[in-house]
Image (cartoon, grey):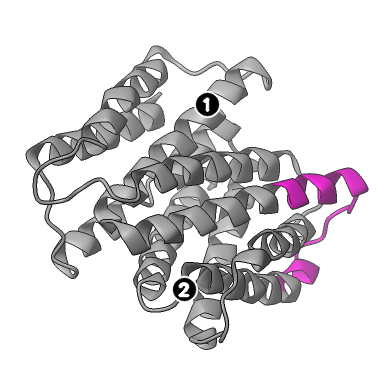
């Protein structure tokens, strides 16, 4: 059941990232990120009472830290998508978001990934280099933003896995995330309903991930949840007609292989 919840998280996150990325090309990325976090907060507040949990200050603190990661991650992810190709930015942010929690899980949490998982981390390095190469149809605009976003995503996953406050940790995270992205909001605030819907979907994805961590190792839940880039990549190429260079395609293949090795490991 934990694996299915993590995969459900990946599915919903993929749709949310695509919708939020498309929206950030029409509306300022800071506004999309902020309204999205408010929408996620409303949904989390509505869902939290239905999942019994012992709420602690420490759990809420971990949830808030997760929200700081979410805020930074979404802010830079949407900015990257507004500047570059979605089919490049999203996978780059995901590879770092997977590799960092795996390393932290080993060093600090006592997780013991297999040789395959370590191979996945090794493959991720050339994957990032290939995707970020200049030349070809798609310039690597937004790659730096994607790398910063990957750190935020890693913090989001790691901190939320440590929270023991049930869905109230997600509530605390949405509050923190909204505060983080608030300075980036540009007036007037438009597209409120679609941006809030994107945030609600992201909250659903986080809830699925949190429930998955209750039944799986953090490293397993993270890598399964991080399969989400497949959706925005496919939609970016098919619906948005994004074109990639040969090197970038090779890099994306390597990124997919890295994630697959981490999952199998």
Between 4 and 233, the one nearer to me in the picture: 233
In the image, the segment drawn in magenta is 47-65
The x and y percentages for residue 104 are: 60, 24
> Is 149 above or below relative to 176?
above
Work out how far the residue at label 1 is from the one at label 2, CA to CA, in angstroms.
Answer: 33 Å
Residue pictured at 91% horizontal, 48% vertical: 57
Mark closer to the chain start, 1 or 2: 2
Residue 183, x across and y down, in percent: 66, 65
On the image, which quarter does residue 213 sit in? top right
223 and 54: which one is in front? 223
The residue positioned 40% from the left and 42% from the top of the image is 144
In front: 114, or 169? 169
The extreme right residue here reads 57
For the point 49% across and 73% down, the residue is: 198
Residue 50 forms part of the magenta stretch: yes
Q: Can you identify the residue that label 2 sits on?
A: 28
| Residue 172 seen anywhere in this rendered image of the structure | yes
Mark 1 or 2: in front is 2
Vertically, is 56 above or below 181?
above
Q: Could you tell me residue 75's position as x and y percent?
A: 53, 58
User: Could you classify mark 1 by the number of other residues whose Cα lies within 10 Å: few (under 14), some (14-19), or many (20 or more)?
Assistant: many
Residue furthest to the top in view is 115
- The residue where tag 1 is placed is 102
């Amino acid at each position: 059941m934990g694996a299915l919840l993590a995969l459900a998280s990946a599915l919903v996150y993929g749709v949310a990232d695509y919708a939020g990325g498309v929206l950030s090309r029409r509306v300022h990325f800071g506004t999309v990120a902020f309204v999205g976090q408010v929408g996620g907060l409303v949904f989390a507040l509505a869902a939290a009472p239905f999942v019994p949990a012992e709420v602690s200050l420490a759990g809420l603190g971990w949830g808030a830290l997760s929200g700081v990661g979410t805020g930074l991650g979404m802010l830079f992810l949407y900015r990257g998508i507004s500047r570059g190709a979605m089919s490049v930015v999203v996978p780059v942010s995901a590879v770092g978001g997977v590799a960092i929690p795996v390393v932290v899980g080993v060093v600090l949490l006592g997780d013991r990934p297999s040789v395959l998982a370590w191979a996945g981390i090794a493959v991720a390095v050339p994957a990032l280099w290939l995707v970020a190469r200049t030349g070809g149809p798609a310039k690597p605009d937004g790659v730096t933003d994607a790398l910063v976003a990957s750190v935020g995503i890693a913090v989001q996953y790691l901190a939320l896995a440590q929270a023991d406050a049930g869905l109230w940790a997600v509530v605390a995270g949405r509050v923190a995330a909204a505060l983080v992205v608030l300075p980036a909001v540009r007036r007037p605030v438009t597209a409120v309903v679609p941006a809030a819907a994107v945030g609600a979907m992201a909250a659903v994805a986080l809830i699925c991930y949190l429930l998955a961590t209750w039944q799986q190792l953090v490293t397993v839940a993270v890598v399964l949840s991080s399969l989400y880039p497949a959706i925005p990549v496919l939609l970016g190429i098919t619906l948005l007609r994004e074109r990639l260079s040969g090197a970038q395609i090779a890099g994306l293949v390597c990124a997919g292989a890295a994630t697959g090795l981490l999952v199998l490991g």
